[in-house]
Image (spheres, helix red, strand yellow):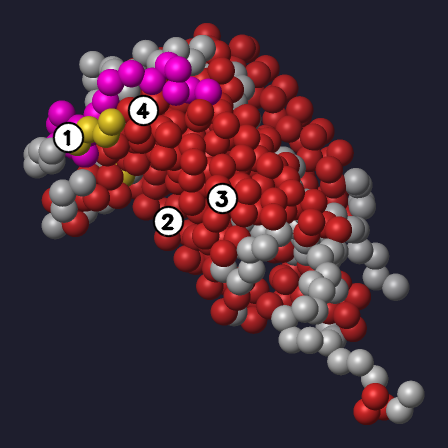
Amino acid sequence: MTTDQLPTAVPGTEAIVEAPAARRQRLTTGGLIVLVGLLLFALLAATHGSAKFALSSAFDPVQLPTFALPGVVTVIICAVACVAAGAGFLSGRLGGRLPALAGTVGGIGFLLGFLTWAAAGRDLPFQLSNQLAGTFAVATPLVLGALAGVLCERSGVINVAIEGQFLVAALAAAVVGTLTHSILWSIVAAAVAGVGMAALLAVFAIKYLVNQVVLGVVLNLLATGITGFLYDQLIQPHAATLNSAPVMENIAIPVLSKIPFFGPVIFDQNALAYLAGISVVVVWILLFKTKWGLRVRSVGEHPRAADTVGISVVGMRWQAVLAGGVFAGMGGAFFTLASTGAFSKEFTVGNGFIALAAVIMGRWHPGWAALMALFFGFVTQLASQLQTLNTPVPSDFLLMLPYVATVIAVAGLIGRVRPPAADGEPYQKA
């Protein structure tokens, strides 16, 4: 058979080869979306009346209208949308941007359907403005912790010790804030404490080449033990003089805070919330628009190649880890300064691990990691809001909701992601 006699493929009939990992991810995502759609169908039996949603809280100067949605009809539409979106994933026939669109439809459908079921037939409306304002507040330390994780892991150092950095920084903010009566010095002290914990991480991970995951767990246990001991032996007996720091007040940005709905939600936050937003932009610029960021990323991807062109792998990793400690320290200060001004044992309740999950879900990018932190903040605030509506969901499950969402999102939706190539690998100069 000559070359011109060889059979040719008919256009449009070429087989699309799907990688096993992509297939598993598609099936997992599609199955999960179908499952939540079926869950909405199951909730129809407990859906009665209409669901009211308030755009303004009782304290907003401009009162926006409250609107209502028919409970049963809305839940049915959302359930059908979820099942259809999940079926599209399972079919494998979605190409181009359709998978992202189907995922968006499934996510919005489940959220709207679930909120409609929760608010249907209740005396009180679901406060949308409180939900979003609380989301930004709860997500603030998660964003800062995620930025710490991004900086560390982009340089090749796994940071499982964000929780420990939070704890130590929260204690430092409480003590220094009580002694100085200054919000600024409290934040500075928390940042210094975060850097101190980061230095321990750097010493053992970079210099002594300790397994970084095990090291992170040990540092978390160390932080829990030290802060617990100091609290029992020193802080609690002298709470009036060592554990009564000032509490941050919200700072309303002129003009912008007066915008109906969005103004009080976004532009009436505390100083650390604004710092978190600015920090996302700063870290993005540092990592992707500066020579320093290029060097950090190079030692996280190909440390041997970076070393051959004269870049100090050890020096860059030290700088990235210590810089991450600053952000983790500010995140830890939030737990003290944004609530009661007082520290208590195990104050951070696992938020450091949620921040680490945000790093992974955000694919080690500061912007996406911040969005994932907002997602976890939304779920945490949602659990609080649902308690006020007296939904039939057990209160214990509502307390678990942020952690359940973390597991589902990381294992079910994100699947396999590629970290920096040298992440977690110690480097020894040849």
In the displayed structure, 236 sits above or below 292; it is above
In the rendered image, residue 117, in percent from the top left (x then y), is placed at: 34, 22
Amino acid type of the residue that numbered disc 1 sits on in the rendered structure: Thr
72 or 149, which lies in front?
Answer: 72
Amino acid type of the residue that numbered disc 4 sits on in the rendered structure: Val
Contact between labelled residues 4 and 3, with CB atoms less than 8 Å apart? no
- SS state under label 4: helix
Amino acid type of the residue that numbered disc 3 sits on in the rendered structure: Ala
Amino acid type of the residue that numbered disc 2 sits on in the rendered structure: Gly
Q: Residue furthest left?
A: 62
For marks 2 and 4, the one nearer the N-term is 4
For marks 2 and 3, the one nearer the N-term is 3
Contact between labelled residues 3 and 1, with CB atoms less than 8 Å apart? no
Quadrant of the drawing holding the C terminus: bottom right
Q: Which mark is residue 277?
A: 2
* Point 55% across, 30% down: residue: 35
Mark 1 Cα shell of 10 Å, populated few (<14), some (14-19), many (≥20): some
**Would residue 187 appear left or right of 214 to someone viewing this image?**
left
Residue at numbered disc 1: 66
Residue at numbered disc 4: 72
Which of the 4 image quarters holds residue 184? top left
348 or 195, which lies in front?
Answer: 348
In space, the residues marked 1 and 3 are separated at their CA atoms by 30 Å
Residue at numbered disc 3: 85
**Would residue 80 appear left or right of 183 to someone viewing this image?**
right
In the rendered image, residue 83, in percent from the top left (x then y), is placed at: 49, 37
In space, the residues marked 2 and 4 are separated at their CA atoms by 39 Å
In space, the residues marked 2 and 1 are separated at their CA atoms by 30 Å
Mark 2 Cα shell of 10 Å, populated few (<14), some (14-19), many (≥20): some
